[in-house]
Image: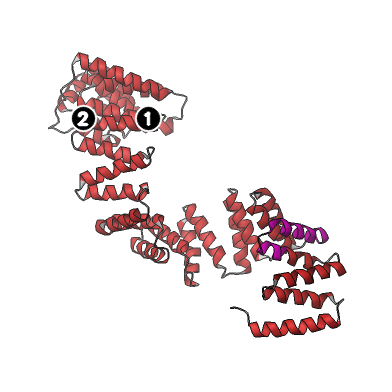
């Protein structure tokens, strides 16, 4: 029980006799009240403490312990009243400021909680609990560096404080400062911590440090301590997958989904693993379920679009990207993909419409360093469309612009070039060159073109008009 009940009863009996013989001895009466508190004789403790206050109105200790009793019983109003009376008597009473901070935090008054806890630390710099609480409050207010400073202070006072070691480890893990995080986390592990969060953070740090075996061991320990934690199971599955153990990865993600069937993260990962194992329909079905569960889950849209393209269903892939464009209307990713696929399918009007739209948005006022790769990709697409429509000279000029935006534009867009540009197009472009830059741009693209690539069967004029109209309508909605 943590308390020798028989010895405590003997102490209470002795103190009761002393109080009876010396009723005005405040010190003995306080000892009796504290003994009643240890014995969980709440009403007796309250009676004795009120008696002390009747004899000595400025007894900080009596007001403080009454605050503790009322806080323990859940009466926060009365608890706050007595703690406030204690600090009114002694403004440097650190324990009362500490508990006032705790009560204010429970009531959502975070600024008040911080002020009271800061007073507790100022009054007693060695108050470990106050430093720890202040760290928690600073984290809640988005002040991680301030929180870390107080948890470091806790460790200066108590080097084996597991709470501080856990929190500092988590703080540095979140900041992706994994080496520093490991210092605190491994110290806590050596001290015998069995906190599942500790082993989760250890797993994250080892994983980021490319120590897959240690990451798996730490995450397995975390799962052992907390078997129903879906987040830990999801990360553990990723560790298995990156270690090429897809079977264990699949088993782990299936376990996570049994615990939480609507969790999109293990659902998505399981789909990816099954797809890689050749069970493509099952993988695609899981990505469909991801979108049904969370219509804004971008990775599932991307993978379904990619799967359609891999299967040769270019129109299906375009439809997937169009759906994604509605989810993230301000992003150039989906429009660029639609333009690429439209070019690949021979719908040059639609490809040109998307490329033109993207070029209009890439205004010079925007940061060129952030946009250089995107600009290069769009210029490459636009130039390819023009070349395919018989405007080789104009097309080559846009290829040069792609090279000017990013010297490595061809390599960065090798997938598009190898799938979509055919040798004849490069030959026509080469004939249209007029200077060294143009010849260099064409040469870079030509070096990645596959000899067996053939031009697509272009759509008829009527189909082109319809597709362009549809594209314009969708783009209009995107702008809104």
Residue at mark 1 to residue at mark 2: CA–CA distance = 26 Å
**Picture coordinates of residue 349, whole percent (x, y):** 26, 18
Residue at (27%, 55%) from the top-left corner?
250
State which quarter of the image contains the N terminus.
bottom right
Marker count (numbered): 2
Where is 440 relative to 349, above or below? below
Q: Is residue 418 visible?
A: yes
Residue at (63%, 62%) from the top-left corner?
153
For marks 1 and 2, give the one nearer the viewer.
Answer: 1
Where is 322 relative to 114, above or below? above
Q: What element carries label 2?
A: helix
Can you tell which quarter of the image residue 412 is in? top left
Which residue has dot 2 on it? Answer: 420
**Picture coordinates of residue 223, whole percent (x, y):** 39, 63
Question: Which comes sooner in the sequence, label 1 or label 2?
Answer: 1
Is residue 87 shown in magenta? yes
Residue at (81%, 76%) from the top-left corner?
27
**Picture coordinates of residue 133, whole percent (x, y):** 63, 59
Q: Is residue 124 visible?
A: no
- Using residue 477 as the reference point, say whether residue 131 is left or right of it: right
- Using residue 326 as the reference point, say whether residue 389 is left or right of it: left
Q: Is mark 1 on a helix, strand or loop?
A: helix
Q: Do the residues labelled 1 and 2 touch (CB within 8 Å)?
A: no
Residue farthest along the front direction in this orientation: 43
**Picture coordinates of residue 218, whole percent (x, y):** 39, 64
Which residue has dot 1 on it? Answer: 326
Range of magenta residues = 67-90
């Amino acid at each position: 029980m943590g308390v020798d009940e028989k010895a405590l009863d003997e102490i209470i009996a002795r103190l009761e006799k002393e109080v009876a013989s010396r009723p005005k001895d405040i010190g003995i009466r306080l000892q009796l009240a504290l003994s009643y508190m240890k014995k969980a004789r709440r009403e007796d403790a309250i009676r004795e403490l009120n008696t002390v206050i009747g004899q000595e109105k400025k007894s900080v200790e009596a007001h403080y312990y009454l605050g503790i009793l009322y806080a323990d019983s859940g009466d926060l109003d009365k608890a706050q009243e007595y703690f406030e009376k204690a600090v009114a008597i002694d403004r440097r009473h650190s324990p009362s400021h500490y508990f006032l901070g705790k009560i204010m935090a429970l009531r959502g008054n975070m600024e008040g909680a911080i002020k009271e806890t800061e007073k507790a630390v100022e009054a007693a710099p060695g108050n470990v609990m106050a430093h720890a609480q202040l760290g928690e409050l600073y984290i809640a207010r988005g002040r991680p560096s301030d929180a870390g400073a107080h948890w470091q202070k806790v460790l200066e006072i108590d080097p084996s404080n597991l709470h501080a070691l856990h929190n500092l480890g988590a703080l540095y893990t979140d900041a992706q400062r994994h080496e520093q995080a490991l210092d605190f986390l491994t110290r806590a592990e050596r001290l015998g911590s069995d906190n599942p969060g500790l082993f989760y953070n250890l797993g994250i740090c080892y994983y980021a440090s490319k120590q897959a075996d240690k990451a798996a061991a730490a995450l397995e320990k975390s799962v052992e301590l907390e078997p129903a934690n879906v987040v830990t199971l999801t990360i553990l599955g990723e560790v298995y997958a990156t270690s090429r153990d897809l079977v264990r990865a699949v088993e782990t993600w299936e376990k996570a989904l049994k615990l939480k069937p609507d969790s999109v993260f293990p659902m998505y990962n399981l789909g990816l693993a099954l797809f890689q194992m050749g069970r493509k329909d099952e993988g695609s079905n899981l990505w469909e379920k991801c979108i049904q569960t969370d219509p804004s889950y971008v990775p599932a849209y991307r993978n379904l679009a990619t799967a359609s393209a891999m299967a040769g269903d270019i129109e299906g892939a375009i439809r997937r990207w169009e759906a994604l464009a509605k989810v993230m209307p301000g992003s150039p990713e989906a429009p660029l993909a639609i333009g690429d696929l439209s070019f690949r399918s021979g719908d040059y009007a639609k490809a040109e419409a998307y490329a033109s739209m993207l070029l209009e948005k890439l205004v010079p006022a925007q940061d060129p360093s952030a946009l250089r790769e995107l600009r290069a990709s769009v210029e490459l697409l636009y130039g390819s469309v023009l070349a395919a429509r018989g405007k080789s000279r104009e097309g080559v000029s846009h290829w040069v612009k792609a090279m000017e935006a990013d010297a490595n534009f061809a390599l960065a867009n090798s997938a598009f070039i190898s799938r979509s540009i055919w040798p004849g197009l490069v030959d026509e472009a080469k004939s249209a060159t007029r200077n060294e830059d143009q010849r260099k741009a064409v040469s870079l693209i030509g070096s990645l073109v596959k000899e067996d690539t053939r031009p697509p069967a272009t759509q008829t004029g009527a189909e082109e008009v319809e597709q362009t109209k549809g594209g314009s309508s969708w783009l209009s909605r995107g702008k809104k």
